[in-house]
Image (cartoon, rainbow, N blue to C red):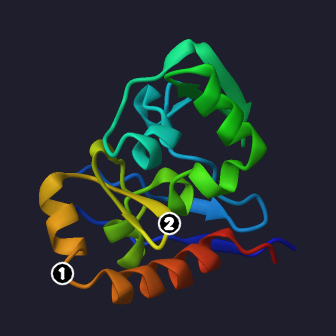
Amino acid sequence: MQRRQVLQIGLAAGGLVMAGRMAAARGIGVFNENGIAISGVDPVAYFREGHAVAGSATYALKWRGVSWYFANAANLAAFEANPRQHAPQFGGYCAYGMSQGLLLATDPDAWAIRDSKLYLTVSPEMLAEWLKDPDSRILQARANWALMTTKT
C-alpha cells in the first residue's frame, strides 16, 4: 500500500502556493509552466552570466519530464553533461517555501547561488527573507524535500 502525504497548504507573501496531496512513491516533478522549466530561463546562465537570461526553443532539451531552454549551444551542452550541477534545487520550487514545507511557484529573477547550487524563490521579498539565514533555510528545505520525495 502506498503511503500518501498531505503537504502543508498556506499562503506566502507575494506567492501562490502550489501544494496539495501527493503520492510519496510518485515523487514531485520539476516546477514548470506549460511544460517549460524556469519560465524558459537558461539555468546555466545564472552561473556563467550572473543573471537570468532568456533561453530559446532552438536550444532545448527534455530532462525530468520538462523542457529546459538555453541561450546557446554551449550552455545546453554544459547542462546535458551534468544537469544536477545546473538545475535549481528542490525541483525549481521556492527555496524559502520549501523550508516551510510548502511548494511555491518561483520567479526566475528572484534567485541566489550558494555553495555552487542554484536556489529560486517566489519573489525578491521572499529571497531577501531567505538570505537572512540561508544555511538554516537550506537544511530545513532539504529535510522537507526529502520527506516529500521519498518513496515508501
Toward the right, the furthest residue is: 1
Q: Looking at the picture, tell me which residue is in the foreground, 12 or 60.
A: 60
Residue 78 drawn at (x, y percent): 67, 39
Residue at 73% from the left image edge and 50% from the top image edge: 82
Along the line of sight, the residue nearer the viewer: 40 or 150: 40
Q: Give the foreground label among 2 and 1.
A: 2
Do we see residue 80 in this rendering?
yes
Residue denoted by label 2:
116
Element type at mark 2: loop
Alpha carbon of mark 2 to alpha carbon of mark 1: how far? 18 Å
- On the image, which quarter does residue 61 sit in? top right
Q: Position of residue 146 (x, y in %)?
A: 63, 78
Quadrant containing the C terminus is bottom right
Identified by mark 1, the residue type is Lys
Identify residue type, mark 2: Ser
Residue 15 at what x, y percent from top left?
22, 52
- State the quadrant of the N terminus: bottom right
Q: Is residue 151 left or right of residue 128?
A: right
Residue corresponding to mark 1? 132
Q: Is disc 2 in contact with disc 1, using a CB cutoff of under 8 Å? A: no
Would you place residue 88 above or below residue 131 in this image? above
The image quadrant that residue 69 belongs to is top right
Residue 12 seen in the figure: no
Specify few, some or many for label 2: CA neighbours under 10 Å numbering under 14, 14-19, or 20 or more. few
Q: Residue at x 67, y 56 (%)?
A: 84
Mark 1 or mark 2, which is nearer the start of the sequence? 2
